[in-house]
Amino acid sequence: MIHTTSEALFAKAKNYIPGGVNSPVRAFKSVGGNPIFIKKAKGAYIYDEDDNQYIELINSWGPMILGHAYAPVEEAVKAAIQHSFSFGAPTRKEVEMAELIIDMVPSIEKVRMVNSGTEATMAAIRVARGFTGRDKIIKFEGCYHGHGDSFLIAAGSGAVTMGVPDSPGVTKGVANDTLTAPFNNLAAVQQLVDANKNQIAALILEPVVGNMGTVLPQEGFLENLRELCTKEGIVLIFDEVMTGFRLAKGGAQERFNIMPDLTTLGKIIGGGMPVGAYGGRKEIMDCVSPQGPVYQAGTLSGNPIAMAAGYAMLTYLNEHPEVYTTLEKTGEKLVSGIREILKKLQLNYQINHIGSMYSLFFTDTPVVDFETAKTSDIPRFGKYFHAMLNRGVYLAPSQYEALFLSTALTDEHIQAILQANEESLREIMS
């Protein structure tokens, strides 16, 4: 494929934007080469500035569950945009959205709209600290909760060691309040809790991880975390920015039947537009200003255009449960096909899959946490990525990112993706 226009745009962008991109993973650093600049998208396809067409398996990192430019969402945006873009004042649609989210997500009794998943997780941590009067939090290696200071922390040298800053600009003081454990390792969590008795405000995790590739919770892990948090008075936060309304109508918490205390949500509640939310138990959410003392605000929170798009999206998902049946079948068909190809080619690569999320890991080690994810052959994944791109399939440009399916994928699309997989895997084997 020819990418002349994308190459020129990237060269120009590097003069004005750090690294030429507005979010690091877009730079293709982990797969090599230069990023593709996207011009438009519709249904299962995206199109770049050179008019190349790709079947797309990122879906804006999850929210385009009905495919790109879904008609009811488009119509809702067109209708709302006639009345101005922002008011900085309450609107009817915010109330309707809050009511709908509370109806769909099992654990949410009250909800606050914000402008991104990062803002949602930052606020949830602050509220948990305000509610408990404690300072420390526990997060898991490989789980990404946005770029808030509290989350950019690497693990310490031992299970009871404080974290260390993972990025310049994050202070040691912030790092001292962040404890890190391996995902799926309950014993490590228990050790942190025991070593920091009555000091831990919150435990935050992706119930199904999407940011080290797709990693599923092992049997009993979420249940035991819920029990531990209840026993120790720790606020359990599910970051459902990726899994919310995707793995089930009520997200991962519905699928696994685990009730967190707080939940964070992302772009899917805006139909893909910039938006987020956090919500949970009434007694915790009533700590938020102006009801309570924990301050959090935003001029654009509850933006009327984003609310209109999100309300159309969630209403459709709420009224059409067959969406989830379709997604389950699509995921199973695609992943089963890839497994058959791996068997045929005698490749022992690992596939982690749940519903409409999956990852192909270039390792023969079962992937259950960040350490096992890091056994993947990253250079080989980069070759695979470009081989798929050349065959018209656009994947996440990182081994450590989940892939997301949409209802726009047909059997013909799946067959095309499978054919591209077999050809690409054969190519990189030679």
Image: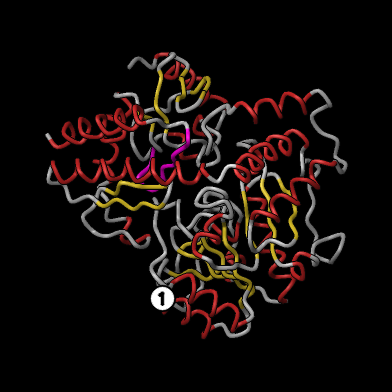
Give residue 385's position: percent from left, percent from top.
31, 34
Locate residue 211 relative to residue 32 in the image: left or right.
right
Q: Residues within 10 Å of mark 1 (few under 14, many from 20)?
A: few
Q: Quadrant of the C terminus?
A: top left
Closest to the observer: 199 or 172?
199
57, 86: nearer the viewer: 57
The range drawn in magenta is: 397-407
Residue in the picture at 42% in, 46% down: 328
Q: Position of residue 182 (x, y in %)?
A: 41, 68
Q: Main secondary structure of the magenta part?
A: loop
Q: Is residue 141 visible?
A: yes
Position of 285 compared to 365: left or right? right
Quadrant of res 58: top left
Q: Is residue 146 visible?
A: no
Q: Does dot 1 land on a helix, a strand or a loop?
A: loop
Q: Point out the image quarter for the N terminus.
A: top left
Pointer 1: what residue? 158
